[in-house]
Image: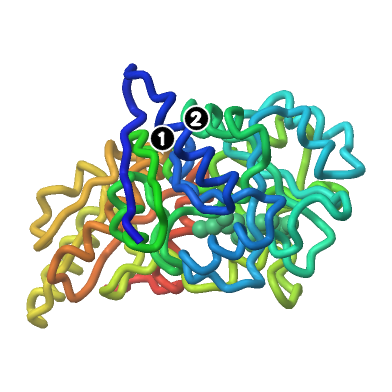
Amino acid sequence: METKLVSVDNFLDNKMNYEQAVDILKNGGVVAFPTETVYGLGALATDELAVQRIFEAKGRPSDNPLIVHIGNKEQVSDYAEAITEDADKLMDACWPGPLTLVFHKKPGVIASNVTPGFETVGIRMPDHPVALALLRALGQPLAAPSANRSGKPSPTEAAHVYKDLEGLIPLILDGGQTGVGVESTVLDMTTNPPTILRPGGTTQETIESIIGKIHSENEFPGEQAPRSPGMKYLHYAPEAPLFIIQNDAQHIGIALDSLHAEGRKVALIAPDEFGDLGADWYFSTGPAHNNEATATNLYAAIRKCDATEADIILAVETDLAGVGAAVMNRLMKAAEGKRYMN
Ligand code: AMP
Ligand code: MG
């Protein structure tokens, strides 16, 4: 299959590109498109065969549910039941935006393979002009996970999608680099209080300022399987092993010296202030102590390591404030929990 990459990131008349995307989607195909978090791979959420194509293109385990994307808040009641007052408040304050709300599913509307084995459905309204234009032109909901091969970092540029999915999907809408850079926060509204199943672009602080204290999944340490099944798979993994390292120039310097003494080549993912410490490759996550910038730049930096000959990747940790919680969650997965100790 030929993969077409078309730009929708300017003031040209994009009508034909959207028409082409809608045509593919209505015929049960998949299309990659930008959202404010990462690029998504969409298919009609009501069409089981179309949704199946997402799992095939991504190589995604079939027990990992997909998020349903809508173009208007009003659509939520077409697919979800028992929408609480708190959910209404969050939708008013945070949509469109990087917040997925998990509701009880209305039976018989969304294709069963979108939420395999679940009585719930995760829904969000993305805050990106291309995603919204596509959803509104289509007039139907899109099931859309991140548009990467399963296990790879989520794509924050159309070129990342092309690299992973060339030959596997017919069309990529290129809307430039995404802004937030990490995926949406997944908030389970069926528990009381609601529970963060995955930290993401909408911060816990923001959510709590709107509806008060909530739970976060890691406050349930005794629980067997994570309730957001996606969290259990290998994720965001570069080719070389990645270790998280403390945000400290001296510590990083010593690590580089000892790795070099062992003859190992090192790629460093770190804020601008650590650019001159002598790593063999250095990829910036932006200004120091700026968790938003780190989120924006993290996945592209991890992907860039794959184009190097690094034997080991060191990635500098952030604090957990704001979107730092999501950054550290993703880094922990990319590192499979490993930290570099001198
Ligand atoms: P992705 O589409 O790659 O951003 O992944 C979606 C994430 O949302 C995964 O971690 C899923 O497990 C999670 N998710 C989606 N729908 C639900 C749901 N109904 N209940 C719990 N988690 C969900
Ligand atoms: Mg994903």
Q: What element carries label 2?
A: loop
Q: Is residue 53 visible?
A: yes
At which x and y percent is residue 29?
53, 53
* Residue 233, horizontal then vertical, whole percent: 54, 73
The image position of residue 33, as x and y in percent, is 45, 42
Say which residue appears at 32% left-offset and 19% top-offset.
12
Quadrant for the C terminus in the image = bottom left
| Rendering quarter of residue 20 | top left
Looking at the image, in which quadrant does ligand 1 appear?
A: bottom right
Could you tell me the amino acid type at mark 1? Answer: Gly
Which is more toward the observer, 5 or 130? 5
Circle 1 packing at 10 Å, graded few (<14), some (14-19), many (20+), is some
Determine which of the numbered discs, if any, sits on residue 179 in the image: 1
Quadrant for residue 64, please give it: bottom right
29 versus 130 height, above or below: below
Q: In this view, does 39 lie to the left or right of 76?
A: left
Q: Which of 188 and 150 is in front in this view?
A: 150
Q: In this view, does 333 lie above or below 31?
A: below
Q: What residue type is labelled 2?
A: His
> In the image, what residue occupies the spot 68% across and 60% down?
48
Query: Which residue is located at x 31 percent, y 54 percent?
Result: 162
Residue 158 shown left or right of residue 224 in the figure: left
The residue identified by callout 2 is: 128
**Marks 2, 1: nearer the viewer:** 2
Q: Residues within 10 Å of mark 2 (few under 14, many from 20)?
A: some
The answer as to whether callout 2 falls within 8 Å of ligand 1 is no
**Cβ atoms under marks 2 and 1 closer than 8 Å:** yes
| Residue at the right extreme, as displayed | 82
Instruction: Name the residue rendered at 87%, 49% in the picture.
Output: 106
Using the rendered image of the protein, determine whether residue 182 is visible from the camera's viewpoint: no
Relative image position of residue 252 (x, y in whole percent):
22, 61
How many numbered marks appear?
A: 2
